[in-house]
Image (cartoon, rainbow, N blue to C red):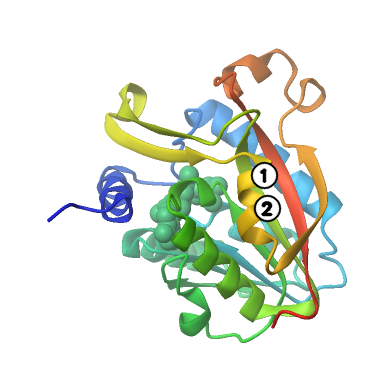
Amino acid sequence: MEISDKEIIKKIFENRAEVIEGHDPWRYGSDLAELTDKVETDWIMNNLPINSSRLMLDVGCGTGRHVLELASHKKSLTILGCDFIEKNIEFANSEKIRMGITNASFFCSSATDFAENSPVSKFDIITAIGLIQYLTTENELLEFTKNCAKLMDDEAVLLLKHPLSYNETFVLDYHREEMDTRYISSYYNMGDLMSVFDDYFELLSSDRTFTEKNMGDILQHIERDERAVQMWLLFSKKRKTV
Ligand SMILES: C[S@@+](CC[C@H](N)C(=O)[O-])C[C@H]1O[C@@H](n2cnc3c(N)ncnc32)[C@H](O)[C@@H]1O
């Protein structure tokens, strides 16, 4: 029987969680990861309505780096994180306790069924930071949008960070040397993304995640694939849908 991309991807992240002892510096190595995390968290704090919002969910939260950082800065905000790797959730929970954070919590769930596993039924903000490239089939992407829509209030927003393809959607499937692992990832273009998201969501804005202004010369080490660029994509929910 053929193994699905989802099973292969889960194995990649499971194996990764076995060898990582802290927040995973996966994308750019530990020095750059600290900087990119800060740029990302700053953008979220400056651009999302987190002051007035009470509840936020980060899907594919990994070891919870964004959740914990945001929760420690914005004490009025309650943030949940979910990921399908149990070990990531265990680590995030132990970090939360170590940091004395009381306004965050984590649960284990897949990006295609988190609505039924979420302990909270409505959120003001949902984020998915570097997640949807691992949802490599249209069905998984559609299930993700349905789960988000189900958990969002009418005024809520959905924020994705995604390496958006300039041309055709393309899939990477190769041995990634610096991480010593097989790597599968789908770089969607805007048209293909919207053909799935359009049922439930409207695009509010798009913005480059990393720029010369926030990265300086390091930008070339961050944006390494000429066919795609890391983007923030912000959506509102279409009212008629759920
Ligand atoms: C590149 S990491 C990003 C983690 C975190 N958002 C960050 O920016 O540091 C992708 C995360 O998505 C999770 N993930 C991938 N596919 C998933 C799925 N189908 N359901 C839930 N989590 C998934 C992985 O376990 C991993 O933690």
Visible residue check, residue 76: yes
Q: Amino acid at mark 1?
A: Gly
Up-down relation of residue 90 to residue 161 (above or below): below
> Which of 137 and 61 lies nearest the eye of the viewer?
137
CB-based contact (under 8 Å), mark 1 and mark 2 = yes
For label 1, the crowd category at 10 Å Cα-Cα, with few meaning under 14, some 14 to 19 and many 20 or more, is some
Residue at 45% from the left image edge and 53% from the top image edge: 135
Looking at the rendered image, the quarter that the N terminus falls into is bottom left
Q: Which picture quadrant has residue 202?
A: bottom right
For label 2, the crowd category at 10 Å Cα-Cα, with few meaning under 14, some 14 to 19 and many 20 or more, is some
Give the side of residue 90 with respect to residue 230, left or right.
left
The numbered disc on residue 230 is: none
Up-down relation of residue 128 to residue 216 (above or below): below
Residue at 67% from the left image edge and 19% from the top image edge: 219
**Residue at which label 1 appears:** 191
The span from disc 1 to disc 2 (Cα, nearest Å) is 5 Å
Give the side of residue 138 with respect to residue 78, left or right.
left
Residue at 54% from the left image edge and 27% from the top image edge: 31
Q: Which picture quadrant has residue 208?
A: top right
- Element class at badge 2: helix
**Residue at which label 2 appears:** 194
**Could you say where residue 196 lies in the image, as x and y percent from the top left?**
61, 58
Looking at the rendered image, the quarter that the C terminus falls into is bottom right
**Could you say where residue 172 lies in the image, as x and y percent from the top left?**
41, 32
**Could you say where residue 218 lies in the image, as x and y percent from the top left?**
65, 17
- Element class at badge 1: helix
Q: Amino acid at mark 2?
A: Met
